[in-house]
């Protein structure tokens, strides 16, 4: 590769049209611009000569304890990727893969307890457990003195539902809304229908004015985004 020629900055001929001081200032400006452009070209040539840039992973491997250029402190580097908690697949449910209203039917058939006999993890039983828990803890749905207490009760009831589902065979957690905010009236639960596991999201509580009682239901919403939560036990 032939070296690049430094650029020439052409300026209009203004001799005699402005004062001598202005001419000198413009000339110094032209020289500064040419020097800056020449330095930029030299930097580009150096970078081009180095070839392809290393990726972050390649740099970490090269500087690590077993790399080609280990640092003196390489033994202190953590080159092991952090472990992450497994999230039950899939995280998103297409809208044509609904529970066919089974969660709502289970809610309608709920008793006064969140403890439902059986071993299935289908949407119907999830609805029974959810609304049964809401009936069991009906005090949390009562009117409150202010908005903050109503919100706190809703979250407590939500986490009690999650715990009841978890202790009866389901993988359940909080729901992250598309806005990125954790929902106070929705949760996620993995159900099984015909041998197929699906992570679903349900709206289960009407967040009415704090002066009115909340009501429970089981309405599937999309998309489901599972967030782990241990719930609150009885």
Image (spheres, helix red, strand yellow):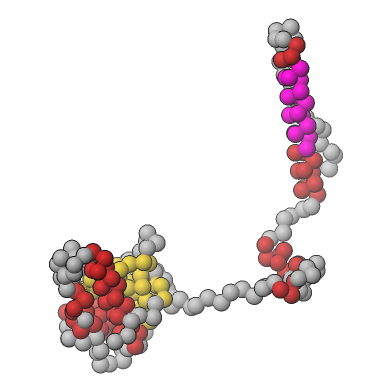
* Residue 210: percent from left, percent from top: 19, 65
Q: Is residue 107 visible?
A: no
Question: Which residue is drawn at the image coordinates 21% and 76% (left, top)?
Answer: 140
Location of residue 79 (image quadrant): bottom right
Q: Say left or right for 232 vs 10.
A: left
Location of residue 131 (image quadrant): bottom left
Query: Which residue of the protein is positioned furthest toward the front in this rendering?
Result: 145
Q: Is residue 52 visible?
A: yes
Q: Quadrant of the N terminus?
A: top right
Question: Which residue is drawn at the image coordinates 67% and 73% (left, top)?
Answer: 78
* Residue 65: percent from left, percent from top: 76, 74
Q: Quadrant of the C terminus?
A: bottom left
Question: Which residue is drawn at the image coordinates 39% and 81% (left, top)?
Answer: 230
Report the magenta residues as a range.
24-39
Q: Say left or right for 114 vs 233.
A: left
Query: Which residue of the protein is positioned furthest toward the right in this rendering?
Result: 2
């Amino acid at each position: 590769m032939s070296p690049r020629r430094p650029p020439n900055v052409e300026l209009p001929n203004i001799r005699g049209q402005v004062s001598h001081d202005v001419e000198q200032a413009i000339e110094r400006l032209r020289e500064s611009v040419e020097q800056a452009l020449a330095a930029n070209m030299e930097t580009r040539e150096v970078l081009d000569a180095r070839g392809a840039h290393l990726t972050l992973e390649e740099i970490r491997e090269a500087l690590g304890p077993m790399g080609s250029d280990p640092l003196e402190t390489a033994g202190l580097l953590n080159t092991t990727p952090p472990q992450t908690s497994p999230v039950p697949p899939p995280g998103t449910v297409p809208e044509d893969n609904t529970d066919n209203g089974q969660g709502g039917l289970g809610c309608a058939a709920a008793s006064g307890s969140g403890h439902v006999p059986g071993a299935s993890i289908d949407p119907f039983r999830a609805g029974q457990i959810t609304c049964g828990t809401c009936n069991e803890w009906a005090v949390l749905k009562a009117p409150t003195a202010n908005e903050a207490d109503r919100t706190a009760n809703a979250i407590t009831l939500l986490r009690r539902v999650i715990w009841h589902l978890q202790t009866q065979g389901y993988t359940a957690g909080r729901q992250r809304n598309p806005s990125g905010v954790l929902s106070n009236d929705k949760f996620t639960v993995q159900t099984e229908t015909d041998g197929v596991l699906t992570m679903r999201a349900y709206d289960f509580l009407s967040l009415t004015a704090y002066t009115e009682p909340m009501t429970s239901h089981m309405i599937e919403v999309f998309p489901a985004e599972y967030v782990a939560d241990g719930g609150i036990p009885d």
